[in-house]
Image (cartoon, rainbow, N blue to C red):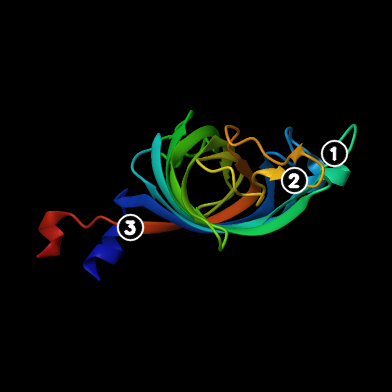
């Protein structure tokens, strides 16, 4: 009770953690989509936990789930003679490091610095029910303080994989001699999302009051 009373009359509250979620869309780059095709966006969503080490550095742990899709017949400007397509669900677990370009939720400047762009990178492990593979996520985002406890954000991230099998293409079509895939061109997937998070406040009780 003493610590609770004390926290309302001093600046001992630390903003260390956030829990939140995001909704958005996923995309794919590989044999069936050599460029970034807006027609191939499919739904995705994530939940996450952020540990704010200081106003500049944040660690983020995330679970992402969504769908990736592509079809030769929708490629621009010309469809492929291969006429292949695929659709797959992705489940990803990731550990990320975020660098805030401006101080974020710093008690000393929070009234002024209410938003920041940031860069992130890290390590992930994903599965699409057929594959179990690592990937390297990285990207950029923007996050902003809505009020004392709530934040919102926007993020775009790419995932560099180490496989050419996201689209389930391999080898050569024996019937017409068309090479289905390039084994030296590894696949990518992407996630774009809008997020909302809740800040968990931690009361740091002074040592002389803990007794």
**The one of 200 and 179 positioned closer to us in this rendering:** 179
162 is higher (above) or lower (below) than 20? above
Secondary structure of the residue carrying numbered label 3: strand
Left or right of residue 48: residue 88: right
- Residue under circle 3? 202
The quadrant in which the C terminus is found is bottom left
The circle on residue 127 is none
User: Callout 1 environment at 10 Å: few (<14), some (14 to 19), or many (20+)?
Assistant: some
Please state the horizontal and vertical placement of residue 60, each as a whole percent of the image: 43, 48
Secondary structure of the residue carrying numbered label 2: strand
Q: Earlier in the sequence, mark 3 or mark 1?
A: 1
Q: Are the two marked residues, 1 and 2, in contact with CB atoms closer than 8 angstroms?
A: no
Please state the horizontal and vertical placement of residue 180, each as a whole percent of the image: 72, 41
Can you tell which of label 1 and label 2 is closer to the viewer? 2
53 is higher (above) or lower (below) than 50? above
Please state the horizontal and vertical placement of residue 84, each as a whole percent of the image: 79, 49
The circle on residue 173 is 2
Could you tell me which residue is drawn at 87 percent across and 34 percent down?
A: 76
Label 3, label 1: how far apart the Cα atoms are: 57 Å
Which residue is farthest top? 101
Q: Earlier in the sequence, mark 1 or mark 2?
A: 1
Can you tell which of label 3 and label 1 is closer to the viewer? 1
Q: Is residue 107 visible?
A: no
Could you tell me which residue is drawn at 32 percent across and 55 percent down?
A: 9
167 is higher (above) or lower (below) than 4? above
Left or right of residue 38: residue 53: left
């Amino acid at each position: 009770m003493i610590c609770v009373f004390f926290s309302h009359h001093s600046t001992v509250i630390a903003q260390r953690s956030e829990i939140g979620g995001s909704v958005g869309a996923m995309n794919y780059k590989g044999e069936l989509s050599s460029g970034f095709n807006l027609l191939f966006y499919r739904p995705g969503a994530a939940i996450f936990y952020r540990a704010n080490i200081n106003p500049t550095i944040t660690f983020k742990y995330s679970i992402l789930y969504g769908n990736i899709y592509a079809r030769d017949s929708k490629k621009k400007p010309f469809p492929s003679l291969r006429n292949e397509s695929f659709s797959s669900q992705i489940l990803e677990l990731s550990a990320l490091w975020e660098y805030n370009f401006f101080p974020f939720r710093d008690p000393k400047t929070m009234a002024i610095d209410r938003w920041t762009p940031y860069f992130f990178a890290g390590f992930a492990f994903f599965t699409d029910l057929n594959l179990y593979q690592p990937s390297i996520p990285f990207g950029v985002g923007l996050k902003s303080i809505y009020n004392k406890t709530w934040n919102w954000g926007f993020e775009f991230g790419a995932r560099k994989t180490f496989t050419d099998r996201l689209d389930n293409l391999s080898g050569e079509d024996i019937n017409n001699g068309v090479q289905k895939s390039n084994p030296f061109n590894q696949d990518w997937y992407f996630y774009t999302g809008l997020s909302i998070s809740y800040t968990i406040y931690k009361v740091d009780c002074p040592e002389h009051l803990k007794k």
